[in-house]
């Protein structure tokens, strides 16, 4: 049972483009939605996170949009750069569950020159 | 990654042998987790710990056991390795209510032949 569905599986954009990665969840108890960035040979690293009391959060070039009624959230990368080429994972957790994260299947992003 | 180390980084083992992976943290974080990463599956939780000697199963716990005798160490044991356990294993740590999310180790690439 996949509780967090992520799409697309892979994405290629040109430098300066705005890649968008989407996630949908099923468990209405989820109340914390982070995004992780992973470079080859490294562990994932927290990029940005949102809680359902807001519909959008921006940190630098990265923005999370959150739609509670649709149970969907997405990551937008403004002015994408070749250094953003990585695998991105969305995740979700619920309060009181030892912060256990359920991850999406990942999106491999390539930003070309 | 700072504060969390995994060992070994790479291991090749034979089917049917027991294998133990180690995760060591210096952050004094309460929660520790073991995930496996496989193409098309993202990161899946194997076991987690919410304190010394307090552990619980994740979604893919069959064939794995864990132990946490000290705050800083979380061991993952494959009781009798199978080819389906060939994967990259990540340890992660977090603190209750912490704003930093998970900190992941650099991973252990395990190959079962």
Image (cartoon, helix red, strand yellow):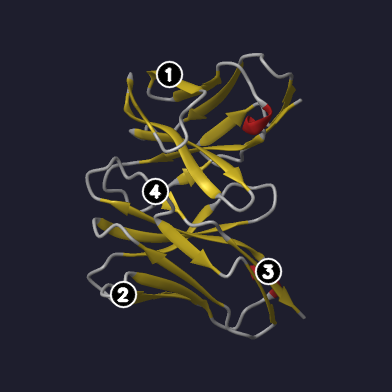
One can see residue A60 in this view: no
Q: In the image, B73: left or right of A78?
A: left
Say if labels 3 and 1 share a chain: no
Q: Secondary structure at mark 3?
A: helix
| Residue found at x 31% / y 49% | B98
Q: Which callout, 1 or 2, points to the residue nearer the camera?
A: 2
For the residues labelled 2 and 4, the Cα–Cα distance comes to 20 Å
Residue A61 is situated, as x and y percent measured from the top left of the image, at: 51, 77
The residue labelled by disc 4 is A101
Q: Secondary structure at mark 1?
A: strand
Viewer-side residue, A32 vs A80 = A32
Q: Which callout, 3 or 1, points to the residue nearer the camera?
A: 1
For the residues labelled 3 and 1, the Cα–Cα distance comes to 38 Å
| Residue found at x 60% / y 16% | B80
The residue labelled by disc 2 is A70
One can see residue B84 in this view: yes
Q: Secondary structure at mark 2?
A: loop
Q: Are marks 1 and 4 in contact (CB under 8 Å)?
A: no
Say if labels 1 and 2 share a chain: no
| Residue found at x 64% / y 32% | B84
Q: Compared to B107, does B62 lie above or below?
A: above
Q: Which callout, 2 or 4, points to the residue nearer the camera?
A: 2
Residue B83 is situated, as x and y percent measured from the top left of the image, at: 69, 29
The quarter in which the N terminus of chain B is drawn is: top right
Label for residue B67? Answer: 1
Q: Secondary structure at mark 4?
A: loop
Instruction: Kindly indicate the quadrant of the structure image that contains residue B77.
Output: top right
The residue labelled by disc 3 is A83
Indicate which disc, 2 or 4, sits on the residue closer to the N terminus: 2
Indicate which disc, 3 or 4, sits on the residue closer to the N terminus: 3
Q: Report crowding for label 1: few under 14, some 14 to 19, many 20 or more residues within 10 A (C-alpha).
A: some
């Amino acid at each position: 049972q996949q509780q967090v569905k992520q799409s697309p599986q892979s994405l290629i954009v040109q430098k300066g483009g705005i890649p968008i990665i989407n996630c949908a969840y099923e468990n209405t108890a989820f109340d914390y939605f982070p995004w992780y960035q992973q470079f080859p040979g490294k562990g994932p690293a927290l990029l940005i996170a949102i809680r359902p009391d807001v519909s959008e959060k921006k940190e630098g070039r990265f923005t999370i949009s959150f739609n509670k009624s649709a149970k969907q959230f997405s990551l937008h990368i403004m002015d994408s750069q070749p250094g953003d080429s990585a695998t991105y994972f969305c995740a979700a957790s619920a309060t009181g569950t030892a912060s256990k994260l359920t991850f999406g299947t990942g999106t491999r992003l390539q930003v070309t020159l | 990654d700072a504060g969390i180390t995994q060992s070994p980084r790479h291991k090749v083992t034979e089917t049917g042998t027991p294998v133990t992976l180690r995760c060591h943290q210096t952050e004094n974080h309460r929660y520790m987790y073991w995930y496996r990463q496989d193409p098309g599956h993202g990161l899946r939780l194997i076991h987690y710990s919410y304190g010394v000697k307090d552990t619980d199963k994740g979604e893919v716990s069959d064939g794995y056991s864990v132990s946490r005798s000290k705050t800083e160490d979380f061991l993952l044991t494959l009781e009798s390795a199978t080819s389906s356990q060939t994967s990259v294993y990540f340890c992660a740590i977090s603190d209750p209510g912490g704003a930093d999310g998970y900190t992941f180790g650099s991973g252990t690439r395990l190959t079962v032949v």
